[in-house]
Amino acid sequence: MARPGEPSQSEVLRERFARVPWRLAIREAIRDRTGNGRTALPDRLEGAVYGQLVGDALGSSGSAGSTAAPPVAWGDEGARMLALLDALLRGPVDPEAGTAAVGLSPRGVLPVPLVMRASKPRETADLAAKASGQRGEAQAACALYALVVRRLVAGERGRADVLARAIRDLRAMPLGAPQRSAADPVVDAFWSGWDAFAGSDCYRDAVTRALGTGPGAGESAATAGGLAGAYWGSAGIPPAWQRGLPEPMVARSLVDRLIETDIPGWDGRPWQTSTSSPLRVDFLELAGREDRASGAIGITSLPGRRYVGYHTGAHWRDLEADAARLRDLGVGALLLLVEDHELVRCRVTGIGEALAAADVELVRFPIRDPLLPRDGVAFRGTIASLLRRVRDGKTVAIACRGGLDRAGMTGACLLREAGFGTEEAIQRVQSARRGALTLPDQQAYVRGWPPHR
């Protein structure tokens, strides 16, 4: 039986239904689906950059059979490609004035269609051609690559149709379309990379096919990797290959800046990334009743989440960067309150491995959003184990998807377990983290602490 003041799950649901009109609930659900439908774009933007870099790294080793891309320094063209991306993100560039590299193959002009994805085809092709520093058929091949990537990033799926439309756009320009028969290594790099991509059913297959094309296989693998990454997104790239890339923070920073140029969904705000918005942990004030607590308690959001939240905005975060951020803040254990399906939806199914690599202990106690713990006795046991860590001088953090409702309630319950009064516990959570613990039923759960069922 529930104690007085401690609502049951059914009471919570009935109260919510009475308080929120069903039409409003449906509208919120539609907005949520619409906003998260936009996550496909940053996935393809990131996939194009990392896809090409991984293909380039594997091409340098000549094999896709290893478990990770070789940890070598960027080649000249890879470095120049990243430099061009940086230049384009800073503002308009004049390739003829020396801002861009000279003599690039198709892979070198990849930043052009990514940054200029909303520009007209002629503008994209013109800048790609000039940035390449090539002439004749080679220049046309670079422009064609840019036009194809532009369409793939926009979400066009039929690969044969994508190529046909890009060729049609190019033929309407003075450049014309490159011929397959042209005896030029730049032209051959595009066509062999395209053929490897067009005949594959996943990213791994595309790069593997390109590596088997003979002389110039490295160029083909980079080109196929860029095309495949733009098509299947970053989720399609084998994680081990991506983790083996050299200078990861350089690429991560540039990719985050690229993604931040998009305004996602209905909220009209740019994506928050681990670069622009490092993971925030708000620490609760412990001075007062619990004089034995020498550690710290923090509240945060789901590390690495890639999700458009109704209240918390659009996030496209890097899981490894967020895990490292927790480590740098001294967090030794993270209590994660989200369910498994939320990990899938927010693209953080590898959170256990990432936290372990950062030496952060993961503690799970899934609670359905935005309800209450079903097993109050087990929940109190988890809270007590966290409090023991705090008393031992450790720093613990509590996370749900947005770090507001479930995490706020749990933080207040931990304070109650530590000896704080009801209103003081609620007030300390709300003071530490703006917007946390506002739902009446979750506040009632804190007031009814400890649970007896």
Image (tube, rainbow, N blue to C red):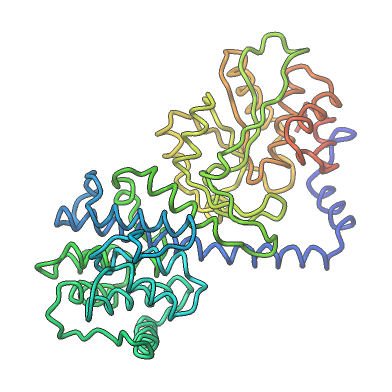
Q: Quadrant of the C terminus?
A: top right
In front here: 364 or 93?
A: 93
Q: Position of residue 355 (x, y in %)?
A: 46, 35
Residue at (63, 36) in percent of width and height: 300
Q: Position of residue 368 (x, y in %)?
A: 68, 47
Q: Position of residue 208 (x, y in %)?
A: 21, 64
Please determine whether, in this image, residue 133 is positioned above or below residue 285: below
Looking at the image, which residue sits at the far left? Answer: 215
Total numbered circles: 0
Residue at (32, 78) in percent of width and height: 144
Horizontal relation, residue 349 to residue 160: left or right: right
In front here: 208 or 369?
A: 208
Please determine whether, in this image, residue 1 is positioned above or below residue 340: above
Residue at (24, 84) in percent of width and height: 178
Looking at the image, which residue sits at the far top? Answer: 291
In front here: 113 or 199?
A: 113
Q: Which image quarter: residue 354?
A: top left
Whether residue 1 is visible to the viewer of this picture, yes or no, is: no
Looking at the image, which residue sits at the far front? Answer: 97
Please determine whether, in this image, residue 221 is positioned above or below residue 138: above
Please determine whether, in this image, residue 262 is positioned above or below residue 276: below
Horizontal relation, residue 319 to residue 21: left or right: left
Q: Position of residue 248 (x, y in %)?
A: 36, 44
Horizontal relation, residue 134 to residue 109: left or right: left
Horizontal relation, residue 239 to residue 117: left or right: left
Residue at (60, 22) in percent of width and height: 385
Q: Quadrant of the N terminus?
A: top right
